[in-house]
Image (cartoon, rainbow, N blue to C red):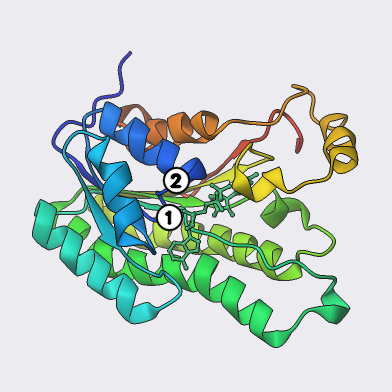
């Protein structure tokens, strides 16, 4: 079994580092042309230069006009967007009672509205071509909730509702939409965690390790492949067994 995405064009948001970068690399290794996207064009170009048939694009996904322009630019450059991975995401943590309105808005705009806008724009071409794969990177926190992350958890749970609704609306056009809910993955986002918190967390993970960006990247590649052609509207939890 080999995942072959030759001839497909993929757009991965937030792909200059971490999980997004691993997804971009894996999709490219499977043969897809990949649009590497970051807020900083130079960084996106540097990552794309390492990948075959790939291009760098600048986009702040929290800015609606940027997202629409990104979809337009990638379609112009590649001729199509067959695969859309909504990966860009941020945290702005605080206990609910102390959470500022602006931190609620920034997280919802960056993590959830961005995905809606990208899906609405990119799905038009997918509908015409009768083929599409959309993967939204949610989180186990969207399933379990988490103290200090009301905004982030709401955005990630929102992505799950978005995923299921899009899956129902677009299934007749052969467009599949799924979410991945990663557990704790070794990236810059989790590097800041205190040693004590890390040890406590590890005790709750049956596989007794944090995940790697590659764990999420291969799950994404699978969901974009022909092997997953009967899977839509699902949330694939990739967390070492933390949530079951
Ligand atoms: P990261 O912080 O290392 O990377 C996030 C990427 O998104 C960066 O390239 C960043 O520049 C980009 N980004 C953030 N806001 C952006 C914006 N407004 N416009 C354009 N790009 C933007 O994070 P990581 O860990 O790689 O996370 C990737 C996704 O996976 C996020 O959606 C995160 O919520 C999710 N996730 C991560 C987990 C983890 O344990 N690391 C667990 C569950 C979900």
Number of numbered callouts drawn: 2
Q: For the residue labelled by badge 1, is the local secondary structure a helix, a strand or a loop?
A: loop
Q: Residue furthest bottom?
A: 101
Asked if ligand 1 lies within 8 A of label 2, the reply is: yes
What residue is rendered at 33% in x and 13% in y?
Answer: 1
Tell me the number on the disc at residue 20. Answer: 2
Viewer-proximal residue, 158 or 200?
200
Q: Is residue 220 above or below residue 188?
A: above
Q: Secondary structure at mark 2?
A: helix
Q: Is residue 169 visible?
A: yes
Q: Characterize the local packing of mark 2: few (<14), some (14-19) or many (20 or more) Cα atoms within 10 angstroms.
A: many
Residue 81 lies, with reference to residue 182, above or below; the image says below
Say if 5 sits above or below 72 in the image.
above
Q: Position of residue 179 (x, y in %)?
A: 51, 48
Displayed quadrant of residue 80? bottom left
Distance from mark 1 CB to nearest ligand 1 atom below 8 Å = yes
Which quarter of the rendering shows the C terminus? Answer: top right
Task: Give the mark nearer the N terminus: 1 vs 2.
Answer: 1
Residue 223 vs residue 73, the one in the foreground? 73
Residue 141, position as x, y percentages in the image: 71, 53
Name the spot of residue 27 as percent of width and height, x first.
31, 35
* Residue drawn where x is 28% and y is 74% of the image: 68
Q: Is residue 36 visible?
A: no
Asked if residue 104 lies left or right of residue 231, the reply is: right
At x 23%, y 40%, the residue is 49
The location of residue 3, given as percent across then percent down, is 30, 23
Pointer 1: what residue? 14
Residue at (70, 62) in percent of width and height:
153
Q: Are marks 1 and 2 in contact (CB under 8 Å)?
A: yes
């Amino acid at each position: 079994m080999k995942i072959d995405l030759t001839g497909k064009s993929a757009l991965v948001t937030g792909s200059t580092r971490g999980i997004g970068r691993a997804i971009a690399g894996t999709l490219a290794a499977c043969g897809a042309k990949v649009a590497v996207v970051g807020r900083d064009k130079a960084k996106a170009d540097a990552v794309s230069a390492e990948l075959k048939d790939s291009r760098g694009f600048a986009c702040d996904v929290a800015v609606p006009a940027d997202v629409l322009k990104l979809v337009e630019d990638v379609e112009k450059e590649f001729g199509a967007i067959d695969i859309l991975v909504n990966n860009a995401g941020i945290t702005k943590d605080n206990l609910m009672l102390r959470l500022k309105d602006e931190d609620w808005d920034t997280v919802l705009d960056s993590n959830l509205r961005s995905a809606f806008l990208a899906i609405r724009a990119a799905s038009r071409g997918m509908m015409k071509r009768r083929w599409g794969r959309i993967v939204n990177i949610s989180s186990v926190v969207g399933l379990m909730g988490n103290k200090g992350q009301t905004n982030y958890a709401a955005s990630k749970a929102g992505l799950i509702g978005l995923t299921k609704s899009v899956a129902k609306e677009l299934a007749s056009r052969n467009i599949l939409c799924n979410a991945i809910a990663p557990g704790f993955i070794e990236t810059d986002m989790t590097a800041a965690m205190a040693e004590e918190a890390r040890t406590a967390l590890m005790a709750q993970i049956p596989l007794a390790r944090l995940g790697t960006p590659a764990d999420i990247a291969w799950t994404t590649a699978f969901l974009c492949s022909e092997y997953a052609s009967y899977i839509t509207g699902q949330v694939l939890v990739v967390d070492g067994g933390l949530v079951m």
